[in-house]
Structures are given as C-alpha cells and as structure tokens.
Amino acid sequence: MTAPWILSEWLKPPTWTQHSSVDELRQDLAATVARPIFLREVSQWDLRWRRMLFQILIPVPLLIEYNIDPVSLTDAQGRPVVFSRQGADQGSFRLELFHSGDAIDPLAEIELVDTIFNQIEVVWVALQDPLGPRFDIDVTPEGAPTLRGTAGRNIAAEEAAQAAGLAPGQIRRGLRSLHWLMERMETLLLCLNQREYVVQPLFYHTAILFEQFGFSYVQGQQRMAEIANGFQPGGVLHAKLDNSSPFRRPALADSIRGRSWAIHDGVLDAPWDRVRMIKRLGVAAGVCTCPGVPW
C-alpha cells in the first residue's frame, strides 16, 4: 500500500505551475545561433565532455552482450575497453571499442576527420565479430601492414577470407549492425550542429552499403553505373572474369561482394579512388546503382 505522504507528493502540481506565468521559465532553444562545431574544437574540450559526445556512438545492448559496463566502459575484470585517439592535426579522432581489455582487434572502430571544405568525413568504419575467425589480410606474409589490402596484399589470407564469405578489407566477419552506427552517427553530427557528412568508400561494396543507408554521390555515381553495366553478361568487366585467379571467377559478377573482390583484384582500368559520397541528416537519397543484385 502506498504511504500517504508519498501519495501526497505525487499529487502536488509541478513547481513550474506555481509561478505566475509558465513563460517565465520557458527558454527558446532556437534563440542562439547553431554554429557548426568541428573536431578541431572538440579536441579542446575537457575529456569528460568528449566522452559524453562519443558515447552517443556506443549502443548499450552491444555493451551488455559482451559484459561491458556501459557507464564505466570497462570489461568484467574492470579493464578499460573504449578509447579515443586524436590525430596530430587535432582535426581527427579514432574511436575504438574492444570486447575485452586484452583483445587485439576492436569490436567497433570509426575514424572521423575535418576536411579542408569544412565538413566532417568518416574515414573508416568497421564492426566485426571479435570471437569469429581472423583473416590476416591487413598484413603481408612478411608482417608489413597492408592498410586492409589497399597498400599491399596477402593473397592467401584474402582467398581464405573470400571463401569464408567476407568482403575485401574484412579481417573478421561483420556484426550486421551497421544500421545502428549510421543512425547514431547522425545524432552525433546533430550534436555538433552539422547538417551533413561525407565518406570516401575504400571498396566497391562499401559504396553500395552507403547507398542503402541513404547516401548520395558527390563524385562517382556515373562510374558506379558504368561498373554495374560492365558486370552484365557481355560487359567489359564480365569479360575479364576469366578464371585467372580466385577473384576473377565468372560467378563473382552475380553478387555485390563478388564484384568487389574482382575490383579489388584490379579488373577496373583505373584505381578505385574516385568515389565520394554525402549523407544529409534525415534525408534518404534513394540512390541505387545496381538494382536487383544480391549481396
């Protein structure tokens, strides 16, 4: 039974109704100019405010799944698992979330940078299963870094990754939860009074993923359409799938992931470096350069 004094507290009117006018307490949140805030400014913030901002990107259910305390950001043994690394120019940040304090690879990672055009760019984003098998596509057989296969290749590791259903650039299978990160990215940009952000996809399949999340093209849409046509039967790219390597099998033309492996293997006449995309907050552009092609 509810105690009488508790009930009386519940029945009290809110304190703001005791004033002569509600308008006396109302504050216009649109009164101040919403000037865009950039990462170089965030770098000057106190660490607690940076932490609060970056926590927007961390979903509580994912933390709980891996026994991470969502408040202290530590694992079950009390070890820290969330880190931010600031770039040398103070206009960039790399955020890393590990599933345990002794993990080698991040569970989630995202790198953001200010551009010379006063925009914020997502340079890298990855969500990967930390308990799944690892494929060393990020280092050569001699141990030199490959920058996920963009600056060098480990062919044997790439073949194993492809056979396991991974796409270029993946060292572990994904978590299939990029949608929540994209949603939270918009919230973070909103907190910085930014209306849009840009990406430069490192691989063909990531460009297609960004299309599905509502991005449009600043540069490269025509090229993407030409690639789609090129992989059609009789197309110039389809003709290059000549079984000369595991990444050039004809069947690869029938999926986004397969096409991405072929492009990663060099079937294009020019390097993959001329695609730039943009996402406007709350706007789904509806762009699709390869309709009907399965993942």
Image (tube, rainbow, N blue to C red):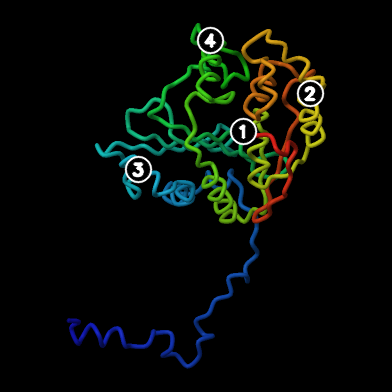
Q: CA distance from mark 3 to mark 2?
A: 45 Å
SS label for mark 4: helix
SS label for mark 3: helix
Q: CA distance from mark 1 to mark 3?
A: 27 Å
Q: CA distance from mark 3 to mark 4?
A: 33 Å
Q: Earlier in the sequence, mark 3 or mark 2?
A: 3
Q: Earlier in the sequence, mark 1 or mark 2?
A: 2
Residue 156's label in the rendered image is 4
Kindly identify the amino acid type of the residue bearing the numbered disc 3: Glu
Q: How many numbered dots are placed on residues in this image?
A: 4
Can you identify the residue that label 3 sits on?
65
Q: Position of residue 126 (x, y in %)?
A: 52, 34
Which quadrant of the rendered structure holds the C terminus? top right
Can you identify the residue that label 1 sits on?
295
Q: CA distance from mark 4 to mark 2?
A: 29 Å
Residue 243 horizontal side relative to residue 223, left or right: left
